[in-house]
């Protein structure tokens, strides 16, 4: 057993000094930065529950530890069908709160459900796009001047007494009309009102990285517009399915959900 472990470690670290992991966000939904010299390759993160694939970029690349996860993730760098780097990542454990909310239930017609599904499909598609790097900042800018969390990322949602999906973003309390800032430079790829998230903005920062701002009272940017990190994109509100004025803020990599607070401490 000892020898096998030794060989695995050798295979992982010894043979490939061209791979450098520059972060240790080894938590569920943790965004990480990795540097690779090999171009013709992709990154694979495997857990008992999921296998995620991420492309390799010139300067540096990203990978995410999936939220549904076990204790170990295997990070593989694969080039021409061969694993050229492997690392066993011990995933740090995390407790997630339960969040109970009561909202007005609206009876949805079949037609409306279909429309919502369609818009969700479009949103998911936009969040999974990979484009060239658009941000120049070295770290995420906070979307509000003051961050006061009301519901954290990963909270288990109970809506009107029924178990619903996990909360895939962070909710920040703020008075209606508070200015909301772009978290990094990028291009606005969505700026419209959606059923659940209300007035919503999605910014594509390139390299698969997107941020989402929901329940706004006002959107001050247009689809297709380039924005700078820190630029005002809208104002806090309570549109869509919401219990009061707040900003729902989400980060995605290639459509994979990222814990914003783990991303905030990252050096890009
Ligand atoms: Zn939320």
Image (cartoon, helix red, strand yellow):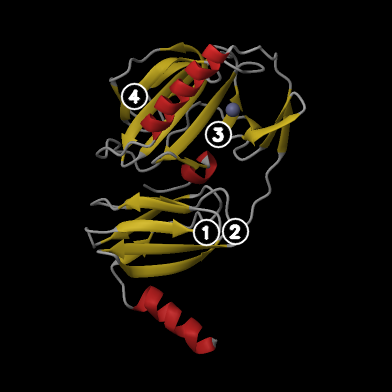
Q: Judging from the image, what secondary structure is the residue with disc 4 in?
A: strand
The residue identified by callout 1 is: 47
The residue identified by callout 3 is: 169
Quadrant into which the N terminus falls: bottom right
Lower position in the chain sequence, tag 2 or tag 3: 2
Task: Identify the image quadrant of residue 7.
Answer: bottom left
Q: Taking the image as drawn, is residue 105 in sight? A: yes
| Residue occupying the point 52% across, 12% down | 111
Image quarter for ligand 1 equals top right
Decide: is 262 above or below 135.
Answer: below
Of residue 174 and residue 15, the one placed in the foreground of this image is: 15
Q: Is mark 2 within 8 Å of ligand 1?
A: no
Query: Of discs 2 and 3, which sits in the foreground?
Result: 2
Query: Of discs 1 and 4, which sits in the foreground?
Result: 1
Q: Residue 11: where, in percent of width, then height? A: 38, 77
Rate crowding at label 4 as few (under 14), some (14 to 19) or many (20 or more) other CA atoms within 10 Å. many
The residue identified by callout 2 is: 70
Q: CA distance from mark 1 to mark 4?
A: 31 Å
**Left or right, residue 130 beside residue 238:** left
Q: CA distance from mark 4 to mark 3?
A: 19 Å
Lower position in the chain sequence, tag 1 or tag 4: 1
- Marks 2 & 1, CB-CB < 8 Å contact: yes
| Residue occupying the point 34% across, 31% down | 204
Q: Residue 142: where, in percent of width, then height? A: 47, 32
Q: Judging from the image, what secondary structure is the residue with disc 1 in?
A: loop
Q: Judging from the image, what secondary structure is the residue with disc 2 in?
A: loop
**Residue 189, disc:** 4
């Amino acid at each position: 057993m000892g020898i096998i472990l030794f060989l695995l470690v050798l295979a992982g670290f010894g043979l490939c000094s061209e791979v450098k992991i520059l972060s240790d966000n080894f938590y569920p939904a943790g965004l990480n930065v990795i540097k690779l010299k090999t171009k013709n390759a992709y990154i694979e993160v495997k857990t008992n529950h999921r296998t995620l694939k991420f492309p390799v970029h010139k300067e540096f690349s990203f990978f995410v530890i999936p939220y549904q996860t076990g204790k170990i993730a295997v990070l593989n760098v694969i080039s021409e069908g061969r694993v050229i780097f492997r690392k066993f990542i011990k995933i740090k454990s995390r407790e997630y709160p339960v969040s109970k909310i009561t909202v007005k239930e609206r009876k949805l017609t079949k037609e409306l459900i279909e429309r919502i599904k369609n818009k969700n499909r479009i949103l998911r598609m936009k969040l999974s796009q990979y484009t060239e790097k658009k941000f120049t900042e070295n770290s995420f800018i906070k979307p509000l001047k003051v961050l006061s969390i009301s519901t954290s990322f990963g909270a288990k949602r109970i809506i009107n007494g029924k178990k619903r999906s996990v909360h895939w973003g962070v909710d920040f309390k703020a008075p209606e009309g508070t200015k909301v800032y772009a978290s990094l430079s990028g291009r606005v790829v969505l700026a419209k009102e959606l059923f659940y998230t209300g007035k919503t903005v999605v910014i594509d920062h390139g390299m698969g990285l997107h941020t989402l701002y929901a329940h706004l009272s006002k959107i001050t940017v247009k689809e297709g517009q380039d924005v700078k990190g820190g630029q005002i994109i809208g104002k806090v509100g309570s549109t869509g399915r919401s219990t009061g004025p707040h900003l729902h803020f989400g980060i995605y990599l290639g459509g994979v959900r990222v814990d914003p607070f783990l991303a905030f401490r990252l050096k890009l």
